[in-house]
Image: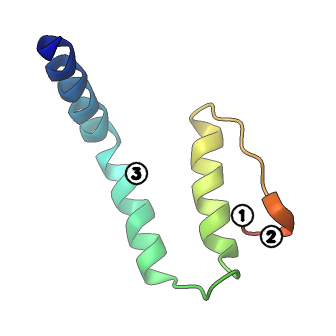
Amino acid sequence: MELFFVQRKERLFALLDEKREILTAMADSLFDNPETAFEEHKAVDLLTSSLEKSGFAVEKGVGSLPTA
């Protein structure tokens, strides 16, 4: 069982290394473009578009909040 978790951990680290450039760019963009609570429109667009490009189905505006 421990080998299973070690392999999963190694795979996770490999995936993060593959995505390092885009994840860093996204983090930099969020840091460079701060938005106030419930007005995070640029952040929502950045994060949801990245998830959609990766094949995730994304539902926006959950709970009557445009940025949720």
Residue at (18% x, 17% y) in the render: 7
**Horizontal relation, residue 51 to residue 25: left or right:** right
Badge 3: how crowded within 10 Å, few (<14), some, or many (20+)?
few
In three-dimensional space, the C-alpha distance between marks 3 and 1, rounded to whole angstroms, equals 22 Å
Residue 34 placement (x, y as % from top left): 52, 85
Q: In the image, residue 18 lies at what x, y percent?
A: 30, 36
Q: How far apart are the alpha carbons under marks 1 and 2?
A: 5 Å
Q: Say few, some or many: other residues with alpha carbon within 10 Å of mark 2 (under 14 / 14 to 19 / 20 or more).
A: few
Residue furthest to the bottom in view is 36
On the rendered structure, is 14 left or right of 2?
right
Mark 1 vs 2: CB contact within 8 A: yes
* Residue at 31 percent of width and 32 percent of height: 15
The residue type indicated by label 1 comes to: Ala
Instruction: Tell me whether circle 3 and circle 2 mark residues in contact (CB < 8 Å).
Output: no
Can you identify the residue that label 1 sits on? 68
Task: Look at the image and tell me whether residue 65 can be seen.
Answer: yes
In the picture, the disc for residue 22 is 3
Look at the numbered disc 2 and give the secondary structure of its residue: loop
Give the label on residue 65, or none. 2
Q: CA distance from mark 3 to mark 2?
A: 27 Å
The residue shown at (80%, 58%) is 62
Quadrant of residue 60 within the rendered picture: bottom right
What type is the residue that disc 2 sits on? Leu
Q: Is residue 1 above or below residue 14?
A: above
